[in-house]
Image (cartoon, helix red, strand yellow):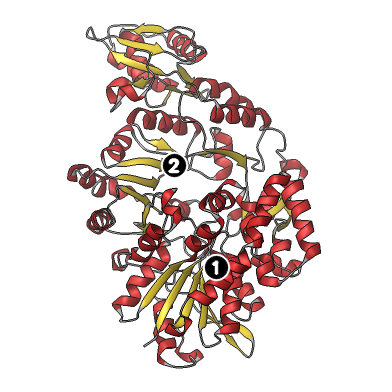
Amino acid sequence: MKKILLLSMPFGALERPALGLSLLKTRLQEVGIGCDVRYLSFTFADLIGAEDYLWISSALPYIAFAGDWSFSEALYGARAEADAGYIEKVLRKTWRIDDESIARIKRIRALTSPFLNYCLESIPWEEYAVAGFTSTFEQNLASLALAKRIKAAHPAVILVFGGANWEAEMGQELHRRFEFVDYVCPGEADESFPALASLLLGQTRARARNLPAGILYRRNGESISTGKSFPVRHMDSLPVPNFSDYFEQWSESSASLVVMPTVLMETSRGCWWGDKSHCTFCGLNGANMAFRSKSARRVLDEMRYLADRWHTRRIEVVDNILDMKYFTDLLPALAQQGQELEIFYEVKANLTRQQVALLRAAGINRIQPGIESLSDHVLKLMRKGTSGLRNVQLLKWCKEYGITVDWNMLYGFPGETRDDYSAMLVMLPAISFLNPPTACGPIRLDRFSPYFESPDDFGFVNVRPIQPYSYLYPFGCESLMKIAYYFDFDYRPEVDPTGYAAEVIAYAERWRHRPEQGVLYSVERPDGTQLLRDTRAAATYREIVLSGLEDAAYDYCDEFRPFPSVVRHLTERFPEIAISAQGVQGFLDSLVANRLMVTDGRNYLSLALQKRAMPAVDAWQTGS
């Protein structure tokens, strides 16, 4: 019986396996279907050099699509005018790519056809009935270019595509345009692809009435859908992914000298916050926002298995958001088991200090909490369900507990005001000892986001595919609107925020490239007073001792508090003292002035890291 071949093409990540293919391999094996997974990304990296592979796939702006463009000639043939336009308008004009880098891209491009010819000649295609391609980010043109060659040389091999680039309308239009693609599995293919594979292995030509839901097929040259795929409802029913092909091919590749593998796993699908309030710019979960998660026991067993099986401590969870119930079952279990893992999770920013401490105890040492701004108004425009001070609070606690935070500073939301950024600019110098933003950039308009679905509601006009698509796909505007995931746009005049963020952007870039070396921290002294020590470059006072009311107020604002709540707390704590609201206000504002605290005008947040909370104080430059 022939087998199934699953393919991950350039420019798939070298440092991580394809989770979807690894899940499908296990599922196919469970039903008795032989399956191999080929990471031809490693093959191409060996040909051009891992350094060049990582450069074009990671260092260059990803929405320039230089990786995809490098395979365009291999797919379509020579198109001198289109190629000249891409180089001039996209690389030079839009992204200001220098001539040396353009020459480097061209050298990589010159090797794409020899690479594809090698793939065609070296793989024993007669062993396979079906070749399945996963296509995400810049994998589309390489996948299509190889698929076209396979169909010409081995027409009996059935070609199936899936992945984020083939979701919904995008997949329908790509299927219509590229006739050598036989089937498409848009959406969750955990059940639809194995069912299709069983059918294709059982007969020469599958009949439409037998096809499972969630399949695009051809009838009289037309692309036809069998309807939406059935999403996985019970996450524990998913198999454990089989990463054996990835690790074997990684170990045989020169890329193993420059990249260390990270094991991927999923503990949930969908987004529970998006179910309540879809963030305006978010295009994730296009097929199904409904949140589903695995049981704590299943997650714990799977993490242990993956760590032991692949001899790694590094596990990257691909979920869009952490299931909050895990704070009561999974995370305590991880903390108790004593297995030293290094886990990445995406979380929501509204965590308590106790929850942050539990994350660290459980081995979650890196998070992405969806912090995209420090302005209450801008966050409200995003529908983020958080606030600027709450975001700063999380950054502070993560610094204390040694958790790395990946966060972005986004700008350009319709309806922003100049005051939003003026207020942020006042706050930034006080918090510059915390983790800087990973990136700072303008908003995108992504398919499936509320911005894309209802542009008029937000003040966007002239929505069109970003420029590179016209050089990647030689089709008309109507077709490109269906294929594209990223879009350009203009603002209506009354909501245009252009220029408001300029000073904040400049500050964030300086913060990223020249982070503060000092730190602000507190120490509880034997006599019960609190010592604030400030080793930051712009410190007003190197040491301040707080006692009594001052100590209580500062400690209470470790979590951001409304001003009336601070006064009420001090009144209850010190009933024998006549508390003056005006005096409390003056004290808090003096702390703000000396960058020991921040405020949004209503709430106050203390900034000093609590030395007693830090697991390894020596890791910070405390000046002690």
Quarter location, residue 541: top left
What's the residue type where badge 2 is placed? Answer: Pro
What's the residue type where badge 1 is placed? Answer: Glu
For this view, does 525 lie left or right of residue 152?
left
Residue drawn 58% across the image and 56% down it? 449
Chain-order first, disc 1 or disc 2: 1
Label 2 neighbourhood size at 10 Å, few (<14), some (14-19), many (20+)? many
- Of residues 265 and 448, the one nearer the viewer is 265
- The residue that disc 1 covers is 167
Q: Pick the quarter of the image with the N terminus.
A: bottom left
- Of residues 66 and 218, the one nearer the viewer is 66
For this view, does 76 lie left or right of residue 49?
right
Label 1 neighbourhood size at 10 Å, few (<14), some (14-19), many (20+)? many
Label count reads: 2
Residue drawn 47% across the image and 93% down it? 204
- Please provide percent x and percent y for residue 426: 58, 21
Q: Pick the quarter of the image with the C terminus.
A: top left
Residue drawn 42% across the image and 11% down it? 584
For this view, does 171 lie left or right of residue 72?
left
Mark number for residue 369? Answer: 2
- Please provide percent x and percent y for residue 102: 70, 50
Q: From this viewpoint, is residue 371 visible?
A: yes
Furthest residue to the left?
A: 337
- The local secondary structure at tag 2 comes to loop
